[in-house]
Image (cartoon, grey):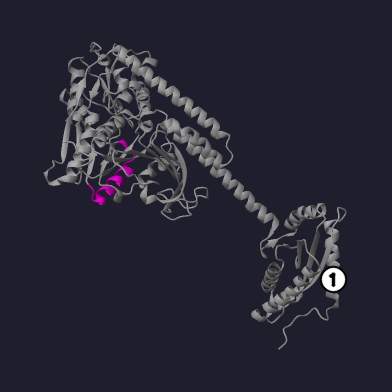
């Protein structure tokens, strides 16, 4: 059934998956993509690379990509939750899918009447494999390498194995079974476990998938065991590597591409007429008996075609490695975020994308302060994304731009206007810390390149390095402010004043310009402290400082000592001096009137104006202003400043 563009509206379908660079996921996605392009559907694939690196904090950052999906923007969903190893995350995704009210197809998932299902019959084919090994090859001591039992496919295959063993009255001890995560490394660990166990060497090792089976064969060879002469090994999935390994792997072929196509097609039918649709589609798998169990079949595949295919894989890998090495090398030399994105921009064209976006959270360069903060701008979020995002690097068919702000709820910095687009949303993070996400539109790079994950890791690490550099510079600036600022009065301290005015004085000396230095000493601070407390004395100092800042204009204002202040102005004359001192006395009187304290805030002020020469020294000029101030202070009739009634 084909839904033509001119007959049907553009549908938007979300796909949830992990590990899109692996063959199982890859094959199903290809089927989904084929159906989508044939029927003008937009596919948005939200994928993590969780489980690849054995690090829980890293996986937390990977899983966060699923928080980005906004169900309100989609017509339906396809779940490949069997690829997600974390049970808690998987259950959360399933719960969200149910709550959305959208039509949902789940591939090889748990029985759930809320969803539509596309299943591949794992049980029948696994039974046939185990039966074959026992009956045709007379194996009795058989070990099993399983995927995680939380995965419904792994559970079905394992139970089929146990059932056949029971039917043939062959016991299965605990040490004959190894539970892994469907990863190649599990095959190696399984062999090590079996070899160290207190049991006879097995006649056969049956594996829950091809990746583990191939690793089992490789590890057995290290122990000087030959497959199938010394031991039989079987897999499941009939992957490219299994078909072209030596020995060719006995395995199970599954219609993965067809499963993906059926899932997408099923949703289209549900959207048009849900009451007429069967909720479950079951596809058959079948065993492929080959060399690794001793069934030497003639290799029917054209060897020339295989050589051409293998060369293409190796050539693509070599080109991608070159791309990654060049990118990593150039990123390591960047010192600013602008340089960083300029480097990345130079490589985007090699990814074969129509569109490519780096989307960053608000205040991504800031401090990570709150592990559970969600959807608030200005705070870092480990779980979820900030309300607004930016895209400092936006590539659209060869044109670069910067998108300063868009809503994370929209997901796309620039909305898609046509159908038949395939978009990949991939996590951008450092360990568990969310920096943002990548978006690639209409590119084979995420599913065809073995180095997509490494490419993103390199960029993510470079952005994190920039974040740390920005934060370090910010911290240095803050420390410098603390070193040069008076925190109580909000002006420069003596160190800050000398640092800044020394440079200003040198310029004025070179350019034969005039300067004005004003020295101010508070009157009666001891009286206030003794009679009203030091807190009140600090308050009076702060009010005096505010008056000085207001009067000094563009000058440099500082607290020079305990109750002493100083102001430096360039290009001033006698009129400026008179204005500053008059304004100071006037504003000080206004403050006293407003505050109505039982004391008056007062100060003595001395100012000099001088045409400076290269021989003039800053401290000599300050002493002159201080001397004038001191003479004025001595002329005052009293140093007690009680307010008169």
> Is 350 or 160 nearer to us in this picture?
350
Q: Which residues are magenta?
A: 83-102
608 left or right of 336?
Answer: right
Q: Is residue 224 magenta?
A: no
573, above or below 484, in the image: below
Query: x, y percentage for residue 124?
Result: 17, 27
Can residue 258 be seen at all in this image of the molecule? yes
> Is 570 or 187 nearer to us in this picture?
570
**Residue corresponding to mark 1:** 630
Q: Is residue 101 magenta?
A: yes
Residue at point 26%, 51% (across, down): 99
595 left or right of 332?
Answer: right
Query: x, y percentage for residue 209?
Result: 29, 26
Query: x, y percentage for residue 550?
Result: 68, 69
Classed neighbour count for the residue bearing mark 1: other residues with Cα under 10 Å, few (<14), some (14–19), many (≥20): some
Query: x, y percentage for residue 316?
Result: 41, 23
Q: Residue furthest left?
A: 276
Q: Residue furthest bottom?
A: 645
Can residue 522 be seen at all in this image of the molecule? no
277 left or right of 570?
Answer: left
Residue at point 33%, 31% (across, down): 180
Point out the image quarter for the C terminus. Answer: bottom right
Quadrant in the rendering for residue 267: top left
Identify the main secondary structure in magenta.
helix
603, above or below 201, in the image: below
How many numbered discs? 1
Residue at point 75%, 70% (across, down): 580
């Amino acid at each position: 059934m084909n839904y033509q563009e001119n007959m049907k509206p553009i549908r938007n379908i979300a796909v949830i998956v992990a590990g899109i660079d692996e063959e199982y996921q890859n094959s199903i996605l290809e089927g989904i993509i084929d159906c989508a392009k044939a029927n003008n559907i937009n596919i948005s694939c939200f994928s993590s690379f969780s489980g690849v690196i054995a690090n829980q904090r890293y996986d937390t950052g990977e899983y966060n990509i699923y928080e980005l999906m906004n169900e309100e923007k989609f017509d339906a969903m396809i779940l490949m939750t069997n690829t997600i190893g974390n049970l808690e995350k998987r259950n959360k995704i399933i719960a969200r899918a149910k709550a959305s009210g959208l039509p949902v197809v789940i591939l090889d998932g748990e029985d759930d009447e809320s969803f539509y299902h596309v299943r591949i019959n794992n049980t029948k084919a696994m039974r046939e494999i185990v039966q074959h090994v026992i009956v045709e090859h007379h194996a009795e001591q058989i070990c099993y390498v399983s995927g995680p039992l939380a995965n419904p496919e792994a559970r079905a295959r394992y139970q089929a194995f146990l059932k056949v063993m029971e039917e043939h009255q062959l016991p299965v001890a605990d040490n004959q079974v190894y539970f892994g995560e469907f990863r190649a490394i599990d095959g190696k660990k399984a062999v090590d476990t079996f070899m160290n166990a207190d049991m006879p060497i097995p006649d056969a090792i049956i594996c829950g998938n091809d990746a583990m089976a191939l690793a089992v064969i490789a590890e057995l060879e290290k122990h000087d065991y030959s497959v199938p002469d010394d031991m039989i090994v079987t897999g499941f999935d009939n992957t490219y590597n299994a078909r072209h390994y030596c020995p060719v792997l006995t395995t199970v072929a599954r219609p993965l591409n067809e499963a993906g196509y059926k899932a997408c097609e099923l949703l289209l039918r549900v959207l048009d007429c849900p009451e007429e649709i069967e909720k479950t589609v079951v596809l058959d798998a079948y065993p492929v008996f080959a060399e690794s169990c001793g069934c030497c079949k003639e290799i029917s595949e054209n060897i020339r075609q295989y050589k051409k295919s293998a060369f293409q894989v190796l050539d693509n890998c070599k080109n991608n490695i070159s791309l990654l090495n060049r990118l990593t090398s150039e990123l390591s030399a960047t010192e600013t975020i602008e340089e960083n994105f300029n480097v990345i921009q130079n490589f985007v064209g090699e990814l074969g994308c129509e569109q490519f976006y780096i989307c960053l959270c608000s205040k991504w360069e800031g401090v990570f302060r709150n592990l559970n903060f969600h959807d608030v701008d200005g705070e870092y979020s480990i779980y979820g994304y900030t309300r607004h995002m930016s895209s400092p690097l936006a590539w659209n068919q060869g044109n670069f731009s910067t998108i300063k702000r868009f809503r994370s709820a929209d997901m796309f910095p620039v909305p898609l206007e046509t159908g038949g687009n395939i978009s990949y949303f991939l996590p951008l993070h450092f360990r568990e810390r969310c920096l943002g996400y990548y978006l690639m539109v209409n590119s084979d790079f995420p599913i065809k390149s073995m180095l997509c994950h490494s490419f993103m890791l390199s960029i993510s690490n470079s952005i994190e390095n920039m974040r740390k550099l920005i934060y370090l510079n910010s911290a240095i600036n803050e420390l410098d402010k603390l070193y040069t600022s008076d925190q109580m009065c909000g002006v420069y301290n003596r160190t800050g004043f000398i640092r800044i005015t020394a440079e200003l004085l040198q310029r004025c000396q070179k350019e034969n310009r005039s300067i004005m230095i004003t020295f101010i000493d508070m009157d009666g601070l001891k009286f206030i402290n003794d009679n009203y407390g030091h807190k009140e004395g600090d308050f009076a100092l702060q009010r005096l400082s505010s008056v000085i800042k207001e009067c000094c204009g563009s000058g440099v204002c500082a607290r020079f000592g305990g109750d002493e202040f100083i102001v430096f102005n360039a290009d001033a004359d006698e009129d400026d001096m008179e204005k500053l001192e008059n304004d100071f006395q006037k504003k000080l009187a206004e403050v006293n009137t407003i505050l109505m304290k039982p004391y008056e805030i007062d100060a003595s002020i001395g100012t000099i104006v001088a045409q400076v020469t290269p021989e003039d020294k800053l401290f000599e000029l300050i002493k002159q202003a201080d001397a004038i101030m001191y003479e004025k202070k001595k002329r005052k009739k009293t140093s007690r400043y009680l307010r008169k009634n």
